[in-house]
Amino acid sequence: MLLTLSLLWGSSFFFVEVVISELPPLTVVFLRVALAAAALWFFAIVIGLRPPMTIGAWTAFLIMGLLNNVIPFTLIAWGQTHIASGLASILTATTPLFTVTVAGILLADERNTPMKLIGVTIGFFGVILMIGPSALSGMGVGVLAQIAVLSAAMSYAFAGVFGRRFKAMGINPIITAAGQVTASAIILAPFAIYIDRPFSLEIPDVETITAIIGLAILSTAVAYILYFRILASAGFMSDYNPYDKDPTGTFFNRVQTFEIGEFPNTQTVHFPKSCLHCEEPPCVPVCPTGASYKREQDGIVLVDYDKCIGCKYCSWACPYGAREIDENQKVMKKCTLCVDRIYDETLPEAERKPACVLACPTSARLFGDVNDPDSIVSEQIRDNGGYQLMPEWGTKPANHYLPRRKANIIIHRDELTRVDNPLNKERQIPMPGEDEQTLDDIMSW
């Protein structure tokens, strides 16, 4: 996904090089975001997504549009009128350098490390080698244009940091992409009309129109869907596919199986145990780095893998044994309540549930808001006497258990001999010889 995004964004320099000789910069940028917005909203509506109606969401789209579109697109488009596209792409490749610096200052979970700086520096020189060192021959020519492109890279860095909030807001990546380019188009429209006066321009040729469409659809619409999907997978949920067939060796959910009663009146109990997402989680205050935390918006308890040092304090504090060390990553892991899934608006509403709830063949697991008296879980707890596990610890778990449904089973004496004995096929049960000892001869029951 990251490689595809790199190719799509890299192609934008080619498209801009084609259209900038025929159209003024602001008009190019406006057409780019306006056409991308139309394509994204069409796609969003087709798959059943709807735009958010809150002021907070559209304010975030407006800021993101400025940082991620209006400022960098305009500066790069203007810069390419004075410098070659190869040099512009090299200067834009400084974005990771700026991002590491900005994120290290503004984000507590993105500490700067020598390896990060070495990595992005190697990547920067790799871009120079791929494009060709000859592209650097233009350095020093059009200094203002070069400063403009570098400023665009800095703006991208701030946008990358700001864009991480959309995951916490529960906004689908497609809606985020559509919202920010829509906000950008609204901002740019009056400036493009007043400064460039596009209505007085000649109709561009087919090559220019094709380049504009490629710039809008491929390098903007499709690229931003990938971009915000990547941002949504960053941070504490770094695995984009957490439901893979190959687990890492830690258990998010355990089912303990044991028997109760006395033979022949015994019953098998299957008791599931996972993180209970307590209202007063003892694992949070003992964490020395703040890696273990409780989300304010929904009360879900999570682990920030970037902060976790694997000290295991949280596992010692948890009375339910819900945390384990991942021996590969050396961090503590636990049930996340599939927080990435339950807020994924690309899924049908019926599927926005934890994986364990969806997978249970008998619907023994229920999912809902325990603070909502009308939710299905609240009704079941109220009607069937649901209870919290180990309430004496004062942790106030959000997860509740329902009493086992008791069945009255009458067992006749002739049913104690299993008729489905796998050794009894065709009545050929292995028997000892006349002179051989049986198990009863050597064992005391």
Image (cartoon, rainbow, N blue to C red):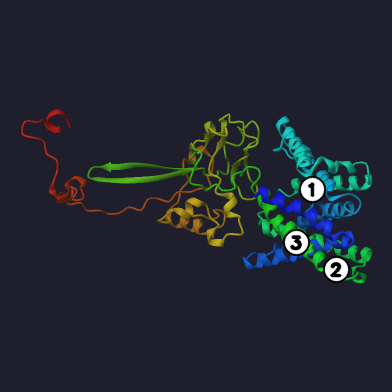
Residue 219: x percent and y percent? 74, 56
User: Label 2: few (<14), some or many (≥20) within 10 Å?
Assistant: few
- Name the residue carrying label 1: 156
Q: Amino acid at mark 3?
A: Gly
Q: Residue at x 81, y 59 (%)?
A: 184
- Name the residue carrying label 2: 204
Q: Is residue 148 shown above or below 197?
A: above
Frontmost residue, 253 versus 21: 21
Label number found at residue 428: none
- Name the residue carrying label 3: 214
Q: Are marks 2 and 1 in contact (CB under 8 Å)?
A: no
Residue 196: x percent and y percent? 92, 64
Label 1: element kind: helix
Frontmost residue, 42 versus 13: 13
Label 2: element kind: loop
Q: Residue at x 65, y 47 (%)?
A: 296
